[in-house]
Every structure is written in structure tokens, then in C-alpha cells.
Image: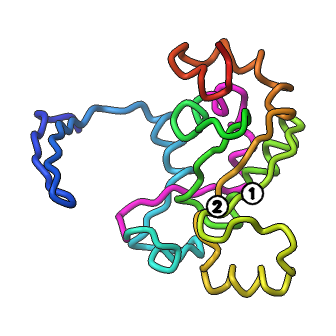
Amino acid sequence: MSGLPKYQINSLMGKTFYSLTISTRSLKCITNLVNKLFFNNLNNSSGHNAEASGIQAEKYIKSINEELYHYFDIVVLAHMIMGDGSMKNKGVTICTDCFNYKEVVILMNILKIKFDLNCTMHFEKHKPLNGLKLTKFTKLMKQNKLGNSRIYIPQSELMKIKSTLIPFMCSHFYYKINYK
């Protein structure tokens, strides 16, 4: 239900942040989609362990499952890049830090199947993973010591879809895909 805006002042690491929060009504079709992408962390039945993955225990947490395949298109990818993407070595890194390893692999598979993109997974804590034996990798993964995983789309792969992405991106985000 919609209500009056809420003004908040928060302090974090000595800095003051101001925010204005509003609630709006939503369409049932949007609510149904949100329910597919978020799970209730308080009644956790998804297999996620919020604390083990370093995510604050909040009421709802983003989740990726195979069903996302049916909703994922070039518009969704454009929005992901605009919101969570950054240019790196003329390619794009998509910050998928809030997802677990399995979910990032699902997302990479969707990118491969839908757009024929050969992406790689990069980890924030342990760079690079080249030459890391599978047993060591598995051990680090189980101990949650790999760090945040991110999807990297190399320049050669980005070139395959750049012209398709541009119509769905705001011009002030073109720099993220190295487009002038």
C-alpha cells in the first residue's frame, strides 16, 4: 500500500547519508516476477546461507534460478550492464557479488545459450584462478573463501552484442561497453 514519503538520515563510517523512501502500489504481474527473483530469508527454503555468503541477513534476498532463462533478454542484459556493469580491459565486468557460485554459473549459462557469449568468472579475493587445481578450488568454494564472483565478458564477446545493446541503454552508460 502506498503511503507518505519517509525521510531518513543514516551514518556509516563517519559519513552522513540522506535518503527519501517511498512506497508505491504495484501491478500483480510485477509482484509475481519479483516473487520469482527474491526469496524470503526468514523462511529460507532455497538452500542459501546468507551469513556464510557474507550477505547481511535481510528479509528478502535476490536469487537466480533456471526459470530466469524465460525472462532474460537483451533488455535485461542492458539493464544489468547499466546498473551493475563496469568496463574492464575493453570488456565488461558484471558485479554479481550478491549471488552464490551456483547462481553465477546459471547466469553465465543463460548468457551462453541466449547470446552465445563466452564469459569467465572472476573472484575478488583470489586473483587469478589460472592454474588453481580443481581440488583447491573446491575446498576454497566450500569454505566460502573464493570471494565475490563476477562475470567478465571479454571485448571479443562484447562485440557480438554491442550493436544490439545500444538501443536499450541510456547514452550516459555507453562508456561501460566502450561505445562513444
Mark 2 element type:
strand
Image: 80 above or below 109: above
First to last magenta residue range? 57-78
Q: Residue 50 at what x, y percent from top left?
A: 47, 73
Relative to the observer, which residue lies in front, 169 or 158?
A: 158
Relative to the observer, which residue lies in front, 63 or 83?
A: 83
Mark 1 element type:
strand
Pointer 2 local density, CA inside 10 Å: few below 14, some 14–19, many at least 20: many
Q: How is the rendered protein coloured? A: rainbow
Quarter of the image holding residue 106?
bottom right
User: Do the residues bearing badges 2 and 1 touch, measured as CB atoms within 8 Å?
Assistant: yes
Image: 110 above or below 91: below
Q: Residue at image x 35%, y 64%?
A: 59
Give the quadrant of the N terminus.
Answer: top left
On the image, numbered disc 1 is attached to which residue?
Answer: 121
Q: Residue at image x 86%, y 26%?
A: 160
Label 2 or label 1, whichever comes before in sequence order: 1
Q: Which mark is residue 149?
A: 2
Q: Which mark is residue 46?
A: none
- Side (left or right) of 67 relative to 110: left
- Side (left or right) of 115 relative to 176: right
Q: Residue 179 at what x, y percent from top left?
A: 67, 17
Image: 164 above or below 98: above
Name the kind of residue labelled 2 in the image.
Answer: Ser
Quarter of the image holding residue 166?
top right
Quarter of the image holding residue 11?
bottom left
Relative to the observer, which residue lies in front, 61 or 78?
A: 78
Q: Residue at image x 55%, y 30%?
A: 82
Q: Residue at image x 62%, y 86%?
A: 143
Name the kind of residue labelled 1 in the image.
Answer: Met
